[in-house]
Image (cartoon, rainbow, N blue to C red):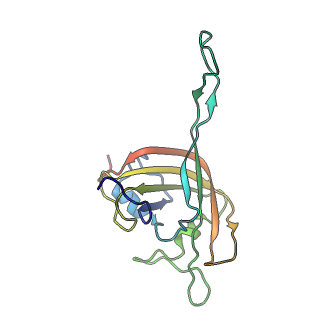
């Protein structure tokens, strides 16, 4: 299969603990996080690398406006759906159910989290596997933002980029 549609193919793990090797998170580390794949709106999911800063550091002999790439940048924005009990309380996380865990993990400003995503031909619901390609991002949460009051109840989360690991690969076990 040479190409794959993107729809339904982004797997997301939200971690409250940094992996021992962020460039090679283990299956255990990813599975210990929150599987957020079916709890985030696809319409405005934007967790991606952005253009790096540039530095004007050319040699004297270079003509033109040559620049070098400096610090990396990323955008971390997503909107988790809210989940409630029949009594209107946040739905608890149980063994097989995520409940309202994505929003609960992101609702306090300044919370440090790690988000890993896999975007391949595998479905979002397929489990993580050793050697899966992934990208990882470390971020701090801002206050949840109100979105339009149409559709499901949800809040937008904007993260302040701290660090990232492009082209990472899932490790079977801890190194």
Which quadrant holds residue 166? top left
Q: Is residue 67 above or below residue 173?
A: above
Label tally: 0
Which quadrant holds residue 7? bottom left
Nearer the observer, 1 or 33:
1
Can you give x and y, in whole percent of width and height, for residue 120 in the image?
37, 56
Can you give x and y, in whole percent of width and height, for residue 97 in the image?
44, 77
Can you give x and y, in whole percent of width and height, for residue 170 in the image?
35, 51
Side of 62 relative to 127 (left or right): right
Residue farthest bottom in this picture: 86
Which quadrant holds residue 1? bottom left
Identified at 66% across, 77% down, the residue is: 150
Q: Is residue 167 above or below residue 99?
A: above
Can you give x and y, in whole percent of width and height, for residue 121 in the image?
35, 58
Residue farthest top in this picture: 61
Q: Is residue 20 above or below residue 150?
A: above
Identified at 64% across, 65% down, the residue is: 156
Side of 32 relative to 141 (left or right): left
């Amino acid at each position: 299969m040479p190409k794959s549609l993107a729809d339904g193919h982004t797997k997301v793990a939200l971690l409250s603990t940094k992996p021992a090797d962020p460039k090679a998170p283990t299956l255990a580390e990813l599975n210990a996080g929150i599987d957020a794949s079916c709890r985030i709106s696809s319409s405005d999911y934007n967790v991606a690398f952005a253009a790096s800063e540039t530095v004007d550091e050319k040699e004297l002999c270079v003509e033109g406006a040559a620049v070098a790439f400096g610090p990396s940048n990323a955008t971390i924005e997503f909107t988790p759906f809210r989940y409630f009990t029949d009594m209107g309380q946040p739905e608890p996380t149980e063994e097989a159910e995520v409940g309202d865990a994505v929003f609960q993990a992101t609702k306090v400003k300044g919370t440090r989290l790690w988000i890993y995503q896999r975007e391949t031909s595998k479905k979002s619901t397929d489990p993580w596997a050793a050697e899966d390609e992934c990208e990882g991002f470390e971020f701090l949460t801002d206050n949840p933002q109100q979105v339009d009051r149409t559709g499901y109840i949800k809040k937008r989360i904007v993260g302040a980029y701290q660090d990232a690991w492009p082209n990472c690969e899932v490790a079977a076990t801890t190194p």
